Amino acid sequence: MFQVLLKLNIFTFTMKKGFNKISSVITGLLLTLLAVYISSCDSKTGITNYNPPPPPIDTNVYGTGNGKITFFRTEQITGLVVIRVSNYQLTDSIVWQVTPDCDTNVAVSKILKAGSYSVSIEGAVFLCNYNVTVEEKKCKLLNYTNCNNGYVGCYTLNGTWLRTADGPCPNCAGLKIQFTDGVGEVVYTPQGCRFPLGDIKWKDFNLSDCTVNDVARDQYGGSPEYQLANLIFYNKDSLSINGPSRVIPYSRTANTNVKTHKKQNTVVMPDVVTDKSAKLQVER
């Protein structure tokens, strides 16, 4: 009997101990669930589905990540003005008396992603370049009057150029040089000028360095010598050849080409050469 009572007590103790352990676990789970509920619950409304606040409204009137650039001038420019920026081409015909408002819908403008851009502005006798930084949310005015704060740079020589001064060469004002296929050939020579028709006057044009090899001739018109010269552009159709033989101005008269001669033989021009036996050597 005693043994039976002892076993019963042991069983009861074991059951109580197990029950207490289970109760502790259950209590811990309930407390955890309660904490999660409280943390996810709106203290005022009791709503458990928490909605994050809406994102702030983008105040950029030009669009996310964009800025704006507005172009204007206060003086007339000959010919239609073409503005190239990024992959866009715009035209401008307005001459402003005062600086316009940047966001006016009258001036020529473009909305672009914030970043750096190259801008080229061209008229009939006007060509100017700019490096422009477009800033997010901002509108920037670019006054291109007289290439203000821009740079002319160096441009292709393609077309026909008229020499507008003699320089060290007598009777050479009016000389015409046509530049095509990488060389500048004489297509018209005034009476008494030492550069004959078909002469290769310019070669090895370097657009990056803005240099060209310009042929010079002695007082008899012979002994051609190519001299490295710097090109100084005043606009796309006006330049000076700045070399050892002085500064010689030229104006572009046409962008199209005419029939060229490119003589490959020795040419004699008695009306130019004092020594009748001297021959003019043409660069081959």
Image (tube, helix red, strand yellow):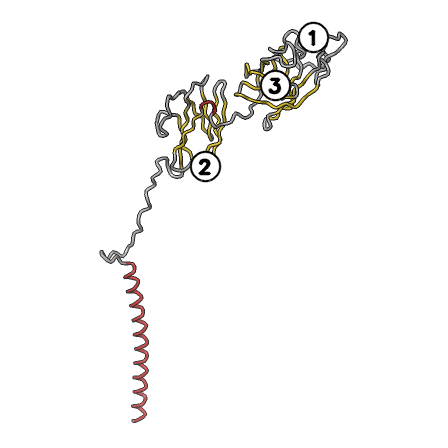
Q: Pointer 2: what residue? A: 115
Q: Quadrant of the C terminus?
A: top right
The reply to whether the C-beta atoms of the residues labelled 1 and 2 are less than 8 Å apart is: no
Q: Pointer 3: what residue? A: 247
Q: Is residue 214 above or below residue 175?
A: below
Quadrant housing residue 172: top right
The residue positioned farthest toward the right in the image shown:
277
State the SS at label 1.
loop
x 35%, y 30%: residue: 103
Give, as a three-letter code, the residue at label 2.
Gly
Please give the count of numbered marks on the rendered protein.
Answer: 3
Front: mark 1 or 2: 1
Crowd tier of the residue under label 1, counting other residues whose Cα lies within 10 Å: few below 14, some 14–19, many 20 or above: some
Camera-side residue: 187 or 237? 237
Quadrant housing residue 61: top left
Q: Pointer 1: what residue? A: 272
Camera-side residue: 220 or 49? 220
Crowd tier of the residue under label 3, counting other residues whose Cα lies within 10 Å: few below 14, some 14–19, many 20 or above: some
